[in-house]
Image (cartoon, helix red, strand yellow):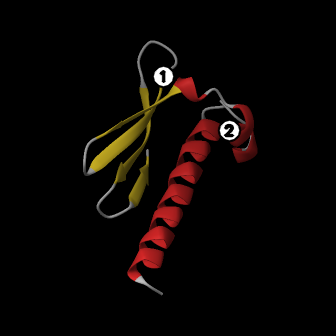
Amino acid sequence: MSSEQSKETTEAVFEAKLLAAICGKLIELGEIKAEEEFLENYPKENLADVHNQETGAYYLMKGEKPLKLVEYNLKTFEVYPL
């Protein structure tokens, strides 16, 4: 596998883990019932992605103040559900 293919695979795995973590938290909060619901019709304006060159987080933008759902690291491609 070339380094470009390896990078693409790592990014795809990271994106899948990030999606699973976001959906898991939204299911836990009762916002959605299944991952498919998020992909098909969840209003993306309810989420905010705040990041810099190394780290980031997704927030649920409903209610009185934002609720942090997951954090992630762009250097290590780790995802940290909260």
Disc 1 to disc 2, C-alpha distance:
15 Å
Residue 3 is tagged as: none
Q: Classify the position of the C terminus by image quarter.
A: top left
On the image, the x and y values in percent for residue 12 come to 52, 63
What is the residue that sits farthest to the top in this orientation? Answer: 64
**In this rendering, position of residue 31 left or right of residue 4:** right
Q: Residues within 10 Å of mark 2 (few under 14, many from 20)?
A: some
Q: Residue at x 26, y 42 (%)?
A: 52
**Residue 59 figure quarter:** top left
On the image, the x and y values in percent for residue 47 come to 51, 29
| Location of residue 13 with respect to 68 vertically, above or below | below
User: Hey, what amino acid is under mark 2?
Assistant: Phe
Q: Viewer-proximal residue, 15 or 28?
A: 15
**In this rendering, position of residue 28 left or right of residue 70:** right
Q: Residues within 10 Å of mark 1 (few under 14, many from 20)?
A: some
Circle 1 SS class = loop
Residue 61 is tagged as: 1
On the image, the x and y values in percent for residue 22 come to 54, 44
Circle 2 SS class = helix
**Residue 42 figure quarter:** top right
